[in-house]
Image (spheres, rainbow, N blue to C red):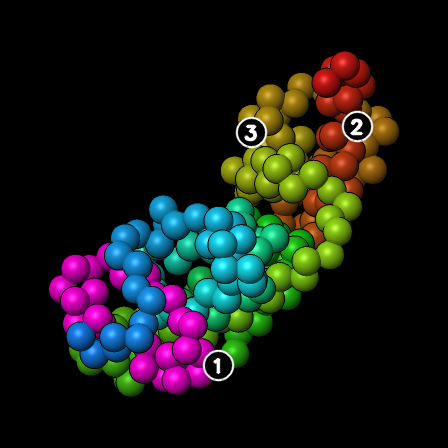
Amino acid sequence: MTEYLLKANKGLTAIEIDRRLAAELRENFPALNLLEGDVLDFDLTEFAETNGSPVRLVGNIPYNISSQILFLALEHRRVVKDVVIMVQLEVAQRIVANHGNKTYGILSVLLQSVADVKICFVVPSNVFFPKPNVESCILKITFRHEEENFNFVLFKKVVKAAFLHRRKTLKNSLQNGLGFKENPSDCPIDLTKRAEQLSINDFIILANYFEKVNKRKNPDD
């Protein structure tokens, strides 16, 4: 994959944590800008600012850190153009799921609130050796880079709290996850619903509501 990416982009930067593989990459691709280390410790914003261009993340990544890499991309979404990675099909299906679907969850909401997500194609298990027990796919995430009409930090807290106990009502989940003790009559979202019943826009409305509540409680903040 590195060979083909380097042919398409002479300015390719690769990150490799395995010293043996890093040495092999240096030997085979002397023109490659290779950084040794853990991608999860990599400051994408600093890299983009140094190079004066947005970041495009491409990789065949370890499946056990798929979610962590996606959260990293979310954190640096202002400088990330898109992400194209191979992940477990089950993970990708959760990410592209719509509300009302049992696979709809935290990553579904967070990513879809700021990006367009799609499964490009499925990679069947029989193309690997040894053959794994899971199906894979290529997932593409394209960040929209439009002005956000909500506080993403608070939005993230609300979404995580709402799905903390996904079978409970929003009222109970938010009480447990956010310490929200009120029973507001002016909340624009029905708190007797469960998290999976709310659309992306519903969560944005809910986050904006909680921001107003916080400002009422702490007008000087």
Answer yes or no: do the residues labelled 3 and 2 have beta carbons within 8 Å? no
Q: Residues within 10 Å of mark 3 (few under 14, many from 20)?
A: some
Distance between the alpha carbons at the discs numbered 1 and 3: 36 Å
163 w.r.t. 20: above or below: above
Stretch of the chain drawn in magenta: 1-26
Label 3: which residue? Answer: 177
Tell me the residue at 21%/79% (across/down). 28
Counting from the top left corner in percent of width and height, residue 38 is at 30, 52
User: Looking at the picture, which amino acid does disc 3 mark?
Assistant: Gly
Label 1: which residue? Answer: 121
Label 2: which residue? Answer: 212
Tell me the residue at 16%/60% (across/down). 19
**96 sits left or right of 15 in the view:** right
Q: Which mark is residue 54?
A: none
Which of 50 and 76 lies nearest the eye of the viewer? Answer: 50
Counting from the top left corner in percent of width and height, residue 13 is at 38, 66
Tell me the quarter of the image containing the N terminus.
Answer: bottom left
Tell me the quarter of the image containing the C terminus.
Answer: top right
